Amino acid sequence: MSRPSCDMNLKSGRSVVRMARLLAVLMIVSLLLTSVGTATMAETTSQALAEAKKRQATLDSQIAELEKQTAQLANEKNKISGQLSWLNERSAEQKMLYEEKSQQLTEALREMANANQAYIDAGETLEQKQEQYEQRMQTMFAHREKSWFEIFIEAGSLKNFFATLQFMSLVAEADQQMIDDLKAAKDDAELKKTHALTHKEDMEAVVAEISAQLEQIRSEAATTASQLKSIEGKMSSAQKAEDALNAEAERLGEQINALAQKLVAEQNARATAAAQAARNNPVGSSSSSSSVNSRGWAWPLPATRNISSYYGWRTHPVYKVKRFHSGIDIDGDYGDAIVAARSGTVILHVNPVEGRNTGGTGYGNYIVIAHDGGFTSLYGHLKNTYVRVGQYVKVGTKIGTCGSTGTSTGSHLHFEIRINGSTTDPLPYIR
């Protein structure tokens, strides 16, 4: 009597698994059919990458030629030979001016090349993941209609049979993670492609202007630096976006300071029961993967310590204008855990594109935590946020995940530390 019941349960269980797998396949196929970037429907990822690689080869060749000329200018003390021999008839000031403009042109081409290479890398990663998932789907379809007996025969042994069953169950559980990974790869490729094409358009205008300036130096022996048009007026959209982000950082400083002072006043006066209750019931617990240093701070992105951009003033290599970076950028993968760098209370929580890898403006999804002593910490460009305003979090608690929301060209964490609203270099505190 029990055997038919077991068979029915087995069949029912197999049907559920098959339905779940079929749903996963449909979700994956829908992602694979989505085109990357703003390309036409007929354009495949491979075709777009092939064109990008051609552009890269051209850019690399131009950069190599300019670097060769720059090296020649730097090494020749007396007479310049070859293509630049005409500079022997120019003054030292003009030689220096030509060298500066050549270097500026090189940097403009390098900016194009770096953005283009980033897209190539992201596109190749997407292709690799697509290939992996296509193989994964073939495996799923191959096993879909097989009986347990057929799987056992193909396994060759009882040990391999149970290993196969375990693998199949693990595959079903991993489907969502695989879909998330593919979505992240697709979003990143789209982001990098858009950035590369925008940079191409922006820098082409700059390259044309600098090339005209070099030609003016070549044709007019009396040309001076003041006579050459400034290329600052041709500021790229990426640089304008960075200016907007800096303006947002300055505005946030005042807001953060006001919120932090308000929190201190509330805590000192015990004016709100919610603040005290939050302290008595903190969110999460310290992460074992995030070690706390002797000053009570933890590294905010435990998965990596690779810093792509440091705190402080930077001079743009093309426009020669100075810009201030109010924090540090730590490279990370989409979905990497972001933890509280120090115990404190969440005073600001902004998530306009919650759960998305990209999108939005400024800092995108971000969190600000107030700490004792007038310190606050900011975590920008997040994918997910796991806290709310008023919550007290312990150092090392997972508060979000790494993303590329807002003004960003790739997955990373923008991390700031402020003292009474003013930014300071975070590294001495969290290292």
Image (cartoon, rainbow, N blue to C red):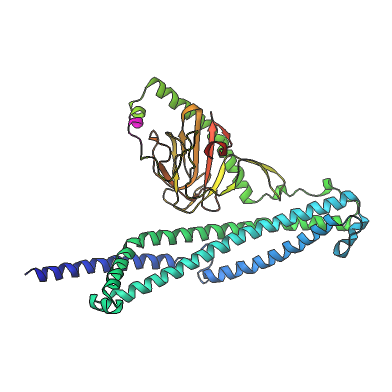
Can the viewer see residue 197 in this picture? no
Farthest residue, direction top: 269
- Name the quarter where the N terminus is drawn: bottom left
Across and down, in percent, residue 386 comes to 39, 43
Quarter of the view holding residue 157:
bottom left
Residue 116 is a magenta residue: no
Indicate left or right for 58 with 49 as reference: right
Can the viewer see residue 417 in this picture? yes
- Nearest the viewer among 312 and 362 is 312
- Nearest the viewer among 127 and 42 is 127
Farthest residue, direction left: 1
Residue 282 is a magenta residue: yes
Quarter of the view holding residue 31:
bottom left
Across and down, in percent, residue 70 comes to 79, 57
Q: Is residue 413 above or below residue 7?
A: above
The magenta region covers: 277-283
- Nearest the viewer among 405 and 297 is 297
Q: Residue at x 73, y 64 (%)?
A: 62
Q: Residue at x 50, y 33 (%)?
A: 295
- Name the quarter where the C terminus is drawn: top right
